[in-house]
Every structure is written in C-alpha cells, then in structure tokens.
Image (tube, grey):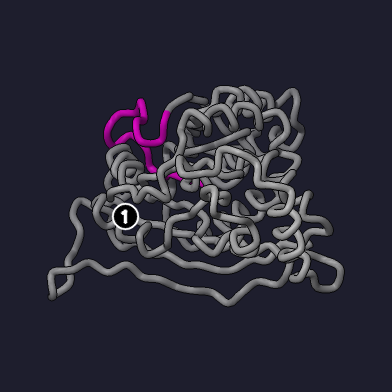
Amino acid sequence: MGTPPDFRLDHALLRRRFARAAAHCDEAAFLACEVARRMDERLDYMRIAPRRILDLGCGTGSDLARLAGRYPDAERLGVDFAPPMLARASQRLSPRRNGLCRLWSKSAPPARLIAAEAAQLPLADASVSLIWSNLMLPAVDDPLSVFREMRRTLENGGLAIFSTLGPDTLRELRAALPTHAGERVHRFIDMHDIGDALLRAGFSDPVMDMEMLTLTYARLDELFDDLRTTAANNASTARARGLAGRADWAQARACYEALRRNGRLPVSIEIIQGHAWKAGHSTPRRDGLTAVHFHPRPPSAPVN
C-alpha cells in the first residue's frame, strides 16, 4: 500500500529513540504487557505446535519468555531493529539473572536475537512456524511490506499473530494539542487498511478485532513521560519541529483538563489484534473476493 504523507515516519529518529528507550522502557510497559496477555489468550484457540517462533519487534524480550512457557520445545528467534533493545533482551533471558525466565524456559532452547528491519528479515523462506508481533506495527508506515516478509518466512500452515494501535488511540491528546505548526501526535493505521494489507500480502482467512481501552492519569505530564519512556511519541515526518508557544500549551492543557473525571484524565487506546494463516493458496469466495472477518469489542473499563 502507498504510504499517505500523514503516516510517513522518520525511521532514523525511531531507531535513535528506541535505542535510548531500551534502558528504561520496561518501567512503563504496562500496555504492552496487557496486550501480550490478551494475545496469549488467543493462542488457546489455535491448533499449532510450532517448531520455530519469531518474535518480530521483540524489544527487551518479555514476550520471548512468555512464548517459552507456552511452547517449551520450540526454537525462538527475537528480531528488533534497535541493538540496545536486544542487549536488554539478552540480559532478561539469561537464566542466571532472571528467576521467572528460568522457570518458564527450563526445558526451552535459548532464544536467538537478531538485529534487523521487519521488512528485510535475514531468514530463509518458509523457515518459521509462528510469527508473534506485539505493538511493533505502529513503528511501520508500510505494513504491506512487513506482511509480505512475514508470509515469505512462514512455512505453509504457519500462523502470524499481531497487535497494533488504531487511529482512535490518544484521541483526547490529538484534539487538545495545536496542529497549526504540524502533526504533534503519532498517527495510527486503520484496522480495515491493516486487513487489506494482509490480503494483498497473500494471507489466508485473516481475522481482526478491535477494542477500546481507557487508561487514566493523575497528571498530563505523566502521559508525556510514558510516551517518551517507551519511544511512543510522534515520529511522523510531518511532525512539528519546534515547541508550541506558551499560550498554545496552556490552551491545550486547559482543554485536556476539561475531560478530567473523578480526579483522573482519560487516555483512549484503540487496540487492534489480528491473526492470519499462510496456506498454499487462498480460497476465494464465489464473487472472486476474499473475506476479512472484523470483530469489534465493547469498550474496556478504565485502567488506572
């Protein structure tokens, strides 16, 4: 898919930010941990016994430890484009340093960690049984190229399962901040465009669902701190290059403060989850099209 100007990302900036975030991102990784838990629940319904698992965008390796608990006999590969993230993952996954990892990985082979771009994987065709990718796609402006690479590296019958964030994420912040100097909030690709990219990449029977989660904060600056700590702040090439004026920031804060309820500020998070299989060929419908199944979910309760 062509990348609209609003979604083009500064990839060099992303690499620098994720490299800097490696030392402290786990301190604010509650959202990624919660989404990983929900993704893991989906695997309860998948009939798959993978021989090799790829965690694409593995970050500091927390999901690799989780996957070892579910599939102790599988070889695990972790790929991330930020070498400092992989260094932290190596520390996390060391049985000498991490008791929980030692418990989960008691019989699992050690994970291999690889520095690479998601759209250019140094892996052979059909060499992976399961691809897991938790909240990596927001750092991608062309999901089609990533899905094509996923399909290339999956063996026939292999499964790709992933999560990302939808365009209603941070909608309160987007509405509050001034935009006359440029885009200030990271933009997220719509679920239907993600589903379309899966089909164009050649995946079979994609299933997508969406749910809204509301986080709450005592202070707006706490949200900004979490975004910086996890390298989740805006990386658009259309982002504003300078600070807004004092009056603009005061107006933005006042606008957000008007949303405060029960002493807390709401932050909307649109969580998108999807999975799809690599079949030898896709089975078209009678009208020649292939269906993507979308399953919206009701909003979740606020999370403090």
- Across and down, in percent, residue 97 comes to 75, 25
Q: Is residue 259 magenta?
A: no
Q: Give the range drawn in magenta.
A: 117-134
Q: Residue at x 26, y 50 (%)?
A: 201
**301 versus 130 height, above or below:** below
Q: Is residue 303 visible?
A: no
Quadrant of the rendering where the C terminus is positioned:
bottom right
- Across and down, in percent, residue 91 comes to 68, 24
Q: Residue at x 30, y 60 (%)?
A: 196
Count of marks, rendered view: 1
**259 versus 165 height, above or below:** below
Q: Which of the 4 quarters of the picture holds residue 155?
A: top left
Q: Which of the 4 quarters of the picture holds residue 294?
A: bottom left
**180 versus 211 height, above or below:** above
Q: Which residue lies furthest to the right in this view?
A: 263
Q: Is residue 136 visible?
A: yes
Task: Categorize mark 1 by other alpha carbons within 10 Å: few (<14), some (14-19), many (20+).
Answer: many
- Across and down, in percent, residue 242 comes to 60, 38
The residue where tag 1 is placed is: 198
**169 versus 130 height, above or below:** below
Q: Camera-side residue: 74 or 54?
A: 54
Would you say 54 lies left or right of 234 here?
left
Tell me the kind of residue under disc 1: Leu
Q: Does the magenta stretch include residue 127?
A: yes
Q: Residue at x 73, y 69 (%)?
A: 302
- Across and down, in percent, residue 237 comes to 45, 40
